[in-house]
Structures are given as C-alpha cells and as structure tokens.
C-alpha cells in the first residue's frame, strides 16, 4: 500500500515565496494574475452602481413578488379545477 504513495511536489512550489513575478510566470505559464477591486474602493462601488440600472423603476418589492406569485397559483388552481370538472362531465355523459 505504501508503494503507491507519491512524495513529489509540483515544480516550483517549494520556493514559491522566494520567486519573483517573472520566475512565477515561467514556472506556471497558465496562471494569470489579475487585479480585483476591493469592496471599500470607490471605483468598485461606482462601477457596480452603473451596472444596476434604474432601481426605482425596475425594483421588485416583496409585496409585488408575493402578489404576482399568488396570481400564478390562482390561475393554476382554476385550470386544474376546469380540467377536473371536464373529466367528471365527460364521465357522466
């Protein structure tokens, strides 16, 4: 069972702290470094707000969602009742 145990490490992982950016790119050519915006960064918040659109007109409130879902459920119930009524009437005739 011990014969299948691997003790090798990934090339370059032993000294990852000592590598500079150029060495890191050479050892791991498929990895990319990207800059991520931080939540406290004003630029991040400004970009985020631009992508939201006009919240006042498009915003769904909890009440609107509840009303719409209730209407869907009522419509489904009516459809099921009609189908049951048709099935009963077809069986009687």
Image (cartoon, rainbow, N blue to C red):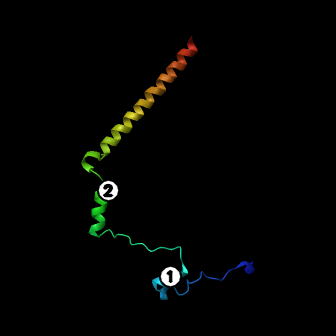
Query: Which of the 4 quarters of the picture holds residue 13?
Result: bottom right
34 or 87: nearer the viewer:
34
In this view, 71 is above or below 60: above
Q: How crowded is mark 1: few (under 14 residues within 10 Å), some or many (20 or more)?
A: some
Query: Residue at position x 40%, y 34% from top?
Result: 72
Assign a secondary structure to mark 1.
helix
Q: Name the residue under label 1.
A: 24
**Which percent across, then down, holds residue 41?**
29, 70
In this view, 31 is above or below 23: above
Query: Residue at position x 47%, y 83% from top?
Result: 22
- The image's mark for residue 46 is none
Query: Residue at position x 46%, y 26% from top?
Result: 79
84 or 20: nearer the viewer:
20
Task: Point out the tag, 2 or 1, that comes first from the N-terminus.
Answer: 1
Query: Which of the 4 quarters of the picture holds residue 62?
Result: top left
Q: Is residue 89 left or right of residue 65?
A: right
Q: Name the residue under label 2.
A: 51
**Which percent across, then down, holds residue 34?**
42, 72
Q: Do the residues labelled 2 and 1 touch (CB within 8 Å)?
A: no
Q: Which residue is farthest top?
A: 93
Q: How crowded is mark 2: few (under 14 residues within 10 Å), some or many (20 or more)?
A: few
9 or 35: nearer the viewer:
35
Quarter containing the C terminus: top right
Quarter containing the N terminus: bottom right
Assign a secondary structure to mark 2.
loop
Spatial distance from mark 2 to mark 1, Cα to Cα?
35 Å
In this view, 69 is above or below 56: above
């Amino acid at each position: 069972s011990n014969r299948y145990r691997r003790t090798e490490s990934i090339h370059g992982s032993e000294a990852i702290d000592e590598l500079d950016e150029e060495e890191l790119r050479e050892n791991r050519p498929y990895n990319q470094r990207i800059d991520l915006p931080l939540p406290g960064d004003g630029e991040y918040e400004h970009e985020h707000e631009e992508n939201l659109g006009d919240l006042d007109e498009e915003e769904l409130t909890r009440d609107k969602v509840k009303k719409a879902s209730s209407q869907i459920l009522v419509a489904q119930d009516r459809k099921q009742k009609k189908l049951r009524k048709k099935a009963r009437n077809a069986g009687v005739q």
